Amino acid sequence: MPNDNHEPLRVLVIDDNPAHAEVVAEGLQRVGYVCSIATSGRAGAKRIEDEEFDVIVTDLRMSGVDGLTIVRKAKQTQPEAEVIVITGFEDDAGEAIKLGASHYLPKPVNLDVLRTIVNKSAERLLQARALRELRRQLDEKFGFEGVIGNSPKMQEVINRLKQLAPTPTTVLILGENGTGKELAARALHFNSPRKNKPFVPMNVTAMNETLLDDELFGHVPGAYTGADKVRQGRFEHAHGGTLFLDEVGDMPLTLQAKLLRVLENGEITRIGSNDPIRVDVRLISATNQDLEAMVAEGKFRRDLYYRLRVGTIRLPPLRDRSMDIPLLAEHFRKEFNGKHGKNVREFSKDVLKAFQANHWPGNVRELRNLIESMVVQDRDGILGFNDMDESEPLRRLKEGVIGKNGGGADQLLGRPLSEVERYYVEKTLELTNHNRNEAAKLLGIGERTLYRMIQDWRLQDKIKHALAETNGDLAAAAAHLKIKPSALERKMKKLRL
C-alpha cells in the first residue's frame, strides 16, 4: 500500500475491454493509487509517450497495438516504471517477461493478488526514489554525477553542468588531460532528457582522417575496397542520444566542414551514398588545446568553433583545487576497496599532505591511478608511502626533497642560485616522468627554454667530466671533447664554469 508520507504512485491501466479496465483501476484506487485508463493499445502508447507513470498494467492481446508493443514502448520510454501484464494465454507471458515486464497475471484477475504485486512494486520504486533523493543531496554538497568537488572552482563547474544538462545545446568542455572531460560529458547526458538513449564517446586523436570519416558517418556497400555491407557511423548509433567527441581540436579541416554541415542541417551522408539521413544527436566536444589560437592560425574553422561553444565548461587542473584532493582520495579509496575486495581504512596524514602539495601534471586521472595501485599493494589497512612503487615520483620526492638525513632542499642552503635552479628543475622533471611539456608548464617557462637549459646542463657535465679526467688540463680536455681549446674556453665562459 502506498506510504502516506510520499506522493501517491501513478498507475496506467491499458485494456481494450473498458469494463475490465474500470474494475482493475477501481481495485487499485481503493488502496490509494492514482489510476488512469486507456481503452486501446494505441491510446496507451500515446499516454506513455506524453506522461510519466510508476506502474503500467496492460492486457496482452489487444487489436492494433498489442501488449508486447506496450511493454517495449514502456521499457524504452520509461525504463524505471514497473510493467505488469494481464493475459488469458500464458504462452504470451514468457515473451513479455523477456521484454522487461516484471510480473504477469492470468485472467480473470484476482484483485488481492494484483494489489500485492503493485504494493511490492511500490516499495521498490519508493526505495529508488529515496536513493535518488539521497544522491541529489550528496550531489548538492559534494558533486554532480561523479563530478566531485567542494572547492569554489568545482562548485562553479557543477552549477554550470546543472544549467546545461537539461538543454539540447552543444557544449564544449575545456581542460588539461586527466581533468575529467568525459566524466563531465556523461554527467550532462545522464541528467538530460536523452538519458535513456545512447551516450557514444569517441576519441578523435586515435584515428587517421579516412578511418575517422568512416567512424563518424558510416558507409554503404562498395564505398571502397572491402566495404561489403552497410555500416552505421557513430552519428547514427547515437541517434536520439549524445555523441561525445574528445580532442576535437585534432579533427582534420575537411572533416570539420562535414561536422559543421551535420550541426546545421541535422543530416549525415554515408560514404559512397548520395542519400542524406536525418539524425537527432546532441553533440558534446572536448579539447585540451586553445581553439581560439588554432582559429587564428587557420587550423580550426571559426564557424565550427562558434557552433561547438554555445555552452562552455572549463575544468580546472587538480593543482588549482587542492582542497578537493582529500574528498577525491576518499572516493577513490572506497571505489577500489570494492573493486579489489580490500579493506583499506584510511590514508596516512603524511600521504594526504603530500597529495595536496603535489602538482599532479596528470590531474585527477593520475591521482586515481596512484590510489588504485596503493590499494592493491596495501597490507595494513593504512595507505602510506610504503604502498607506492619505488619509481613513484611522490615517493622519490619524499625521500629526496622532504626526507631527512641532511638531504634534499636543506643541502642547497648557501649554494649558488644556478645549482638551486637546476635542482628544482630536475625534481620537476622527475615528477612529470621527464615530460618536458608538463614540466615547463609547472615551472612557468617555455618548453624551448627548458630544452635549452637541459642541453646546457648536459654540456656542463661533459666539460666537468673531461676536466676531471685530464686533471684540469684545458688542452687535453678539449681533445677529449674533440673541440679546439679556444672553443672550449668560450663554452666555459658562456656556461660560467
Image (cartoon, helix red, strand yellow):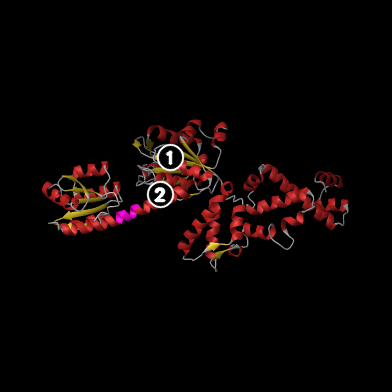
Image quadrant holding the N terminus, namely: bottom left
Find the residue positioned furthest to the front: 5
Is residue 377 inside the magenta stretch?
A: no
Horizontal relation, residue 453 to residue 167: left or right: right
Residue neighbourhood size for the residue with mark 2, other residues' Cα within 10 Å, grouped as few (<14), some (14–19), many (≥20): some
Please give the name of the residue rendered at 25% of the width and 44% of the height, measured from the top-left corner.
Answer: 48
**Mark 2, secondary structure of its residue:** helix
User: Can the viewer see residue 466?
Assistant: yes
Cα separation, mark 2 vs mark 1, equals 15 Å
Horizontal relation, residue 411 to residue 394: left or right: right
Circle 1 residue: 163
- The correct choice, above or below, for 253 with respect to 29 in the image is above
Image location (x, y in percent) of residue 37: 18, 45
Circle 2 residue: 136
Overall secondary structure of the magenta stretch? helix
**Callout 2–callout 1 Cβ contact below 8 Å:** no
Please give the name of the residue rendered at 26% of the width and 58% of the height, measured from the top-left corner.
Answer: 120
Q: Which amino acid is tagged 1?
A: Gln
**Mark 1, secondary structure of its residue:** helix
Is 196 in front, or is 142?
142
Q: Which residues are magenta?
A: 124-129
- The correct choice, above or below, for 378 with respect to 460 in the image is below
User: Can the viewer see residue 144?
Assistant: no
Q: Which mark is residue 86?
A: none
Is residue 127 inside the magenta stretch?
A: yes
Q: How many numbered marks, from 0 up? A: 2
Residue neighbourhood size for the residue with mark 1, other residues' Cα within 10 Å, grouped as few (<14), some (14–19), many (≥20): few
Image location (x, y in percent) of residue 337: 48, 63
Please give the name of the residue rendered at 49% of the width and 66% of the height, measured from the top-left corner.
Answer: 343
Is 317 in front, or is 492?
317
Residue mark closest to the camera, 2 vs 1:
2
